[in-house]
Structures are given as structure tokens and as C-alpha cells.
Amino acid sequence: MKLARHFAERITALKYTDLPPAAVYWSKVAVMDTLGVMLAGSREEPPHIVEDVLGLSGSGDCLIVGSNRRAGPLDAALINGTSAHVLDFDNTAAHMGGHVSAVMVPALLAAAEAFDCNGRDLLLGHAVGYEVGARIGQAVNFYHTELGWHPTWTIGVFAVTAACARMLHLTTDETETAMAMATSLAGGTKANFGTMTKSLHAGSCARNGLQAVLLARKGFTANPNAFEHKQGFFEVFNGKGNYDIARATAQWADPLDIIEPGASYKLYPCCYSTHAAIEAALNIVKKHGRLDPKNIARVESHTADVRLLHTDRPSPNSELDAKFSVQYCVLRALIDGRVVMEHFENEAYREAAVRDALPRVQAIPLKGIAFDKEDPFNALVKVTLSDGTVYESAVDYPLGRTSANPIAFADIKAKFENCAARVLPGPTAQAVAQTIDRMDTLDHVRDLMAQVVSAAPVLIRKSA
């Protein structure tokens, strides 16, 4: 059986009643977390530029989050997906190897508004899409991401396609076609990390996955052999001998990947590959207090080679670039005792004390250091002060890293309200959080989106 058909049969067979309570819970958390960072991200310039370029008329069924404007479902998915990822504050999936909910949730919300879907179908779609992304990710990673592809889009497009196909009740044949079509709608290279284009990867992925579904339900065609073909997805994106289709078909929903290992949620608005090092630095601050940058002689930040490929940035030159600089993020943690959105705004990376200290922060490949639990996100931070005092902290499993070390729901909710407060009044943000918490009883997702827009200001776009 070809892979597109294999997935189509499983996508259409899974029902909401098949979901364990934990899968429903984690899908709700994903919607809350993603909508929060989407609201905060809507204040940034990239989604405004995307909207300007689209030249929208303002009509449509779907909300452009962070405004009271509307668009068609594909354009809304593109703009809102860009907003969801621009702050790099959204969750990640270990087996997919990228950002999973920032691509699915914008597409699901747009399609749910356009076609009047209920909350249960949206939650089911998210869980199904997560599963598909995980299975394909296991077939191609880590070679795929080390080669330079950005799995958030290259693999995420299949998660979006599966999620929207299930929510919109496509047939097995239609779902097979949509999945095959999505092989031609994947893209995204890691060369554009640290620029606006990275957030466009998420927006384009959300749009393309939904587009595949909407075309398939209208009778569009695609090659059902598009994954395995000699010029298909696996051969083109990974090359012969660098993938394992058997891993894509193994262990479907046993358990659901959204439960185990589950997503990783962020406490800091920057690349997840910096988080363990940030946490190690914050552990030093908790024990010894914030450090005066003038007293820092040397900082050694040890992380895995694969993480340094995109985070070894000793001298960031933009806010987005700073989100990928492990040197900057660790230094911020040491001198401020926190890493927050404001550290990646208004050219905070240019502050004199920061620029002076950054050359003394070194990113070093993590080798020969034993941890209680080996993980690609292990980190060790060692600080040497001017008087010779040495502080050291190691983190082998950062908080929020999968469901095995979860962030408390109260903290997820607080993060949502903090992010949403950039657009919505506090009481409205709290009401939206409550609606998401009961999404499984929501007959119309449109009701949730009506709350999001009710007090949202009309944003002034920055681009000309």
C-alpha cells in the first residue's frame, strides 16, 4: 500500500471518541498556546507586510487575528500562520522535528470559520495532524533537518493537510489525493533562520496544507505514489538510502504522539535550541543572583553540535537574529534573570552593556559531559567571574520538554494571557482562555473567533 493511501485510511478512521482524555487536553493546550503567540505576533511587521502584498479587499469569512479585518481561508491561514511563528514562541514536536501547532492551528481556525466546524472536530484534526507529522518526521530525520530543510514546513505541510482533511470530513480517496498533492507544496530551508522568511515558512505551510485539502475535495488530482516515486518526496528531499518508510507506518496512534512524547512548550520567546542553556543560566541566577556584565570574564555555553548549526551567532544583527543567538540568550538570562519578549524588541540586542559582554560568551559543542538523561537539548553553562569565581549549571531536560516534563497549565494560561494582552483587554483574554478550555463543547468555532475580534483594535500596518 502506498503511503498516501496508508495515511488516508488512518486519518479518516480515527474518531473523536477514540481520543484519550490526554489527547484532548494537549490539543486544547496547543490551541491556547498557539492563539496566544499568534495574537502577540500579530503586532509584528512580517504579517503586516504579507497582508499588504496580498492586497486584500477586506471581505471574507475568516479573521485576520489581531485586527477586525477578514479574508478568505487561504489568505487568513497564511497571515495568521506567519503571526503564530514570528516570535518563535510556539511549541515544537520532537518526532516531526519542527514547529507543529503554529502551522496547524491557523489553518484549522480559518477552515473552521469558513465551513462552520465545531470544537470537537478541530481538536480531533489537531491530534490527527500531529500524528501524521510525527510519523513522516521519523522517516526522514535527523538527516532531513541536518541537510538544511526546515521540517516546520517540509513535514508540517502533511500535518496541516491531515488535520484539515479530518476536520472537514474528507473521504479516504480525497484525503489520499490531498496528502499526495502536499508533497508538491512542501518547502523551506534553514538558511533563512533569523529572518522574516522563517515565519513565512509557517504561514506558507498553513496555507498550502489547507489548499491541498480544498482542492482535493473539489476533485483535483495528484499521483498517489508521490511519496515513494523515484522523483517523489523521499527521494527529492532526502535522497536514496537516507530515509526509512517503515518508520512512517509503524506505531500509528500507539500511543498518540501528541500524548507521548508530546509537544515541547516554550517559556522563552526564542529558538528552542537555546532553551536548555537559558534554563542553566537562570539556575545560576537563582542561586547567586543576577550578574553584572562588567564582572563576567568568560561564559561557556555548551550545547549539542546539531543545535549550534543555527544558534552559534556571536554577534546578532537584528531582533530576529538575536532569537537564534545562544550567546545573546544566555547573556540576557545571566544579567536580567529572565528572557522575555522585550529582549527581542526595539534593538535591545544593541544595548552597550550587552554588546560589550557578548565577545566573552562562547558557544561550545557539547562533548564528553555526562547527563542523567541524554537528550539533543542538553546544555551546560559555566561562568567565570573577574575574581576567578566559577558558577556552573547543567540541564539535561528543560522544563516544557515533552509531556514528560510539562509546564503547568496555570503557566500556559498565564503565558496566553500575557501574549494576548498585546491585543485584547485582560477580561477578554481570560474569557477566550475559558472558551478554549471548553472547546470540546463548542458547537461553532466561529464563537471563539468572535471573542478574539470583539475588542481587537484595527492595526496600523508599518509597511508602505
Image (tube, rainbow, N blue to C red):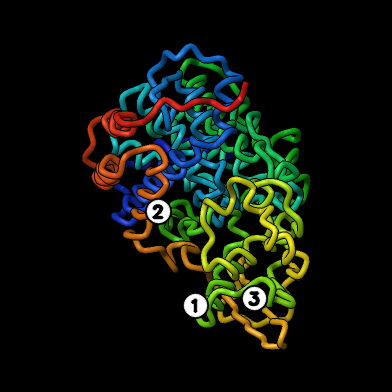
Query: Mark 3 or mark 1: which comes first in sequence?
Result: 1
Query: Mark 3 or mark 2: which comes first in sequence?
Result: 3
C-alpha distance separating marks 3 and 1:
16 Å
Determine whether label 3 and label 2 are within 8 Å by CB.
no
Determine whether label 2 and label 1 are within 8 Å by CB.
no
For badge 1, the amino acid type reads Lys
Asked whether the viewer can see residue 301, the reply is yes
Along the line of sight, the residue nearer the viewer: 40 or 353: 353
Q: Please state, as top left, top right, bottom left or bottom right, where the N terminus lies in the image.
A: top right
Residue 317 in percent (x, y) is at 73, 48
Name the mark on residue 286.
1
Q: Identify residue for label 2.
A: 415
2 vs 1, front mark: 1
User: Relative to residue 200, is residue 171 drawn left or right?
Assistant: left
User: Relative to residue 404, is residue 220 drawn left or right?
Assistant: right
For badge 2, the amino acid type reads Lys
Q: Identify residue for label 3.
A: 380
Residue sitting at 49 percent across and 55 percent down?
251
Circle 2 sits in a helix, a strand or a loop, which is it? helix
Determine whether label 3 and label 1 are within 8 Å by CB.
no
Circle 1 sits in a helix, a strand or a loop, which is it? helix
C-alpha distance separating marks 2 and 1:
21 Å
Along the line of sight, the residue nearer the viewer: 19 or 317: 317
Along the line of sight, the residue nearer the viewer: 249 or 31: 31
Residue sitting at 32 percent across and 41 percent down?
15
Residue 247 in percent (x, y) is at 59, 54
Circle 3 sits in a helix, a strand or a loop, which is it? strand
Q: Is 19 rendered above or below residue 185?
A: below
For badge 3, the amino acid type reads Leu
